[in-house]
Image: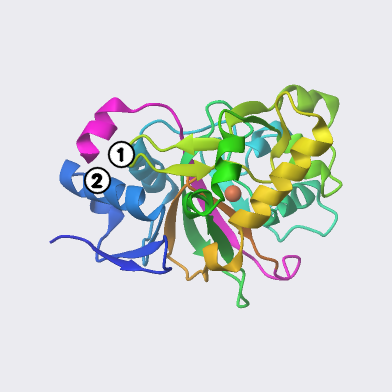
């Protein structure tokens, strides 16, 4: 049975069903999901009861190699024991809700800034896949912004100005904006990476703005001018009409394309309520066999 894609926003994001992703192994269905990602950039699947291993396996079936060098890895060993499985929770190593002063909590608060996953690495993250396991009784939403439409709606003069520009992305930069400092040893592991400000998505040919809070400066530009340009672009890309806000339900599984969106977590009373999600992110490296399969 072909999948139904129901739009959640005028320019991107769709809910997909009916499907149990744990059971999806056939090339045609995987290709259909990839084609949906090309069109919508954010896909929401309801009632997906993944175990950690099933989530890791599905991510590899869909999009290839997993990213294991996300920022938290520099802070110490993951509570979950696998660096490919990002612990998007407010729990400490004992499984209790983190205290307000917990260093990992302060670090995680950076997810409330608009960002793209692992853009401070090379290769960066391509698809992120977030599985909602335990949710608080209050809203704790995630917002997504459509950076393809953001690019399309720039004035021509700005598009010309951005041509060929590159930005340096650093998690030390985005965390410093909230007052979080890495130690020297941690900083050694997090040197940052340089990426084009405008990306062209290989399968769809569409262009997107690739900036957000990790972007620290424009290469070959004075720092203040570069930061002001980045702030203008982020402001343009996150206008309310370009934002889809996802209200989580337990069992939700959301896949987004980090090359075509930016996202941020919205605040809730995180020292009171438990919130536990798991994220797997794939490496943004060419995957010719996957690209062919999606056509
Ligand atoms: Fe994120």
**Residue holding disc 1:** 61
The residue furthest left is 1
**In this picture, residue 178 sits left or right of residue 268:** right
Q: Provide the residue span drawn in magenta.
A: 268-295
User: Which quadrant is the N terminus positioned in?
Assistant: bottom left
Question: Quick one: 249 or 224, which is closer to the camera?
Answer: 224
For the point 81% across and 51% down, the residue is: 102
Label 1 within 8 A of ligand 1 by Cβ: no
Residue 172 showing in the rendered view: yes
Work out whether 105 lies above or below 83. below
For the point 66% across and 65% down, the residue is: 266
Work out whether 182 lies above or below 96. above
**In this picture, residue 263 sits left or right of residue 223:** left
Asked if marks 1 and 2 touch (Cβ < 8 Å), the reply is: yes
Q: Position of residue 41 (x, y in %)?
A: 41, 52
On residue 30, the disc is 2
For the point 56% across and 51% down, the residue is: 154
Tag 1's secondary structure? helix
Q: Position of residue 129 (x, y in %)?
A: 45, 49
């Amino acid at each position: 049975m072909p999948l139904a894609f129901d739009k959640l926003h005028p320019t991107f994001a769709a809910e997909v069903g009916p499907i149990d992703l744990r059971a999806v192994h056939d090339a045609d269905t995987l290709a259909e999901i990839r084609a949906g990602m090309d069109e919508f950039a954010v896909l929401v699947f309801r009632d997906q009861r993944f175990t950690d291993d099933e989530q890791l396996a599905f991510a590899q079936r869909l999009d290839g190699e997993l990213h294991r060098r996300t920022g938290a890895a520099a802070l110490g060993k993951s509570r979950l024991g696998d660096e490919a499985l990002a612990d998007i929770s407010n729990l400490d190593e004992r499984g209790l809700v983190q205290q307000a002063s917990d260093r990992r909590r302060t670090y995680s608060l950076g997810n409330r800034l608009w960002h793209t996953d692992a853009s401070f690495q090379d290769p960066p993250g391509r698809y992120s896949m977030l599985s909602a396991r335990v949710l608080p009784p209050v809203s704790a939403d995630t917002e997504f912004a459509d950076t393809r439409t953001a690019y399309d709606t720039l004035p021509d003069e700005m598009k010309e100005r951005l041509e060929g520009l590159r930005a340096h992305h650093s998690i030390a930069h985005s965390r410093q904006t909230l007052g979080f400092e890495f130690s020297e040893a941690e900083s050694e592991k997090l040197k940052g990476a340089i990426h084009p400000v405008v990306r062209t998505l290989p399968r769809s040919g569409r262009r997107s703005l690739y900036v957000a809070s990790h972007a620290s400066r424009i290469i070959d530009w004075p720092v203040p001018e570069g930061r002001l340009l980045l702030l203008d672009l982020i402001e343009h890309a996150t206008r309310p009409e370009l934002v889809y806000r996802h209200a989580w339900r337990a069992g939700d599984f959301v896949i987004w394309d980090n090359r075509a969106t930016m996202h941020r977590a919205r605040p809730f009373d995180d020292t009171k309520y438990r919130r536990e999600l798991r994220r797997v992110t794939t490496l943004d490296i060419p995957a010719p066999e996957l690209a062919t399969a999606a056509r």
